Amino acid sequence: MSVLEYEKFKRLNNIFASNFNSQFDKIKDGGKDALFMYFDNIYRLWYYSALFHEAFATPAVFADIWFKGAGVNVCLPRMSDGRLEFEWRLYTVDEHPFIKDLTTLAQTADDMASFDSITHELIPDDFKKYAHGFTISDNIYISYLVEIALEMGLIKKRPSVHIVKYMSTAKGRSMEQLDGRTALEMAAECAAKIFCRKFAAVLGTPVGLNKALVMSWLKGTCLTDDIYADIYDLVGIDIIDLWKNERGSDDLDELDRAALASVYPIGRLIDRYFLTPFGRYMQLIQPIYYMPFSPEHELEYIFGHDVRDDYDNSLAAFAPCSMYRLTSLGRTMLSAEKKDVPFALSELEMENYLAQMMKYYR
């Protein structure tokens, strides 16, 4: 990573920091403390959102353009003493931060850290103590690590009262001995199983909801609408046809209304248990949101509604992207032949647009 490209992305981050800080200052102190625990989830939405309309030019795409090479270079935010800072991590098959964090989690469990019994999140005091040791200092990320570690058999519950404590298993203590590809493949398969379990809790156990279906989305599509279509097809609903249907709402039957009403919570589940784990956490795919991200609207929604999700108590900041592409790591692990997403603008055109934007963010 050259100094020039690093400085360019530093200025790019100033766009986020400037917009975020102006809204952050309006939040009451108690809300600020809570936000620190989930901060990466806010930055994640900006990182994968278009910087300007009618283009797929996201910060993640610029990271790919500027930092070509082995693996995926990823920018991560840190909140330190109330200040917003950024650092870079490289994700490769052999050196993968998510896999390293599973080992860190096993060690944290053995250190008698306490977790919420419902969300799997670290309790606030232990979050302050342990979160800095993880690649992503975000409680939703840590809670997902717990789910993966339980699925992989790396940790198990230990007897405790009111809160949950875990302890590492022999598999957890020997994680570092696995080669990178094997460990990442195991984590991806467990992520697919978790996705199926979460959706089975909503849909029942429809035929066809299985690991193979989830893994097919990594290799065979780039549109989130296709995931919606497959999920609703499991219960006999053509959701794409419903979206295209021009009948007035008065003409919809009860089943159609229920299907349309479920799209928003289903979308949040798709993001939380597919797009974000395989994207932000494992870096096998790169989500792309068509529209620019607004910290003002996002923070206003979260704090204005005291939002906690109906599913697994996650923050409301989950929302499905429009499409996604395989990263260089994803192509190595999954499908080197899969075509990339065709961008509306050339790299030079995106650079020119961005240069105009950054004149206002020094």
Image (cartoon, helix red, strand yellow):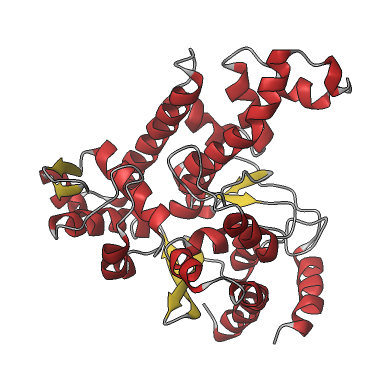
Please report the residue visible at 54 percent of the width from the left and 50 percent of the height from the top.
Answer: 307
Residue 360, compared with residue 276, is above or below; it is: below
Q: Quadrant of the C terminus?
A: bottom right
**Residue 349 at x, y percent in the picture:** 82, 67
Residue 178, compared with residue 263, is above or below; it is: below
Residue 44: name its quadrant: bottom right
Residue 315, compared with residue 135, is above or below; it is: above
For the residue pair 116 and 240, the one nearer the viewer reads as 116
Please report the residue visible at 60 percent of the width from the left and 50 percent of the height from the top.
Answer: 287
Please report the residue visible at 42 percent of the width from the left and 82 percent of the height from the top.
Answer: 81
**Residue 229 at x, y percent in the picture:** 65, 25
**Image-based side of 251 in relation to 324, left or right:** right
**Residue 227 at x, y percent in the picture:** 61, 31
For the residue pair 243 and 309, the one nearer the viewer reads as 309
Specify whether residue 316 is in view. yes
**Residue 158 at x, y percent in the picture:** 12, 44
Residue 360, compared with residue 222, is above or below; it is: below
Specify whether residue 96 is in view. no
The number of numbered discs placed on residues in the rendered structure image is 0
Please report the residue visible at 68 percent of the width from the left and 74 percent of the height from the top.
Answer: 19
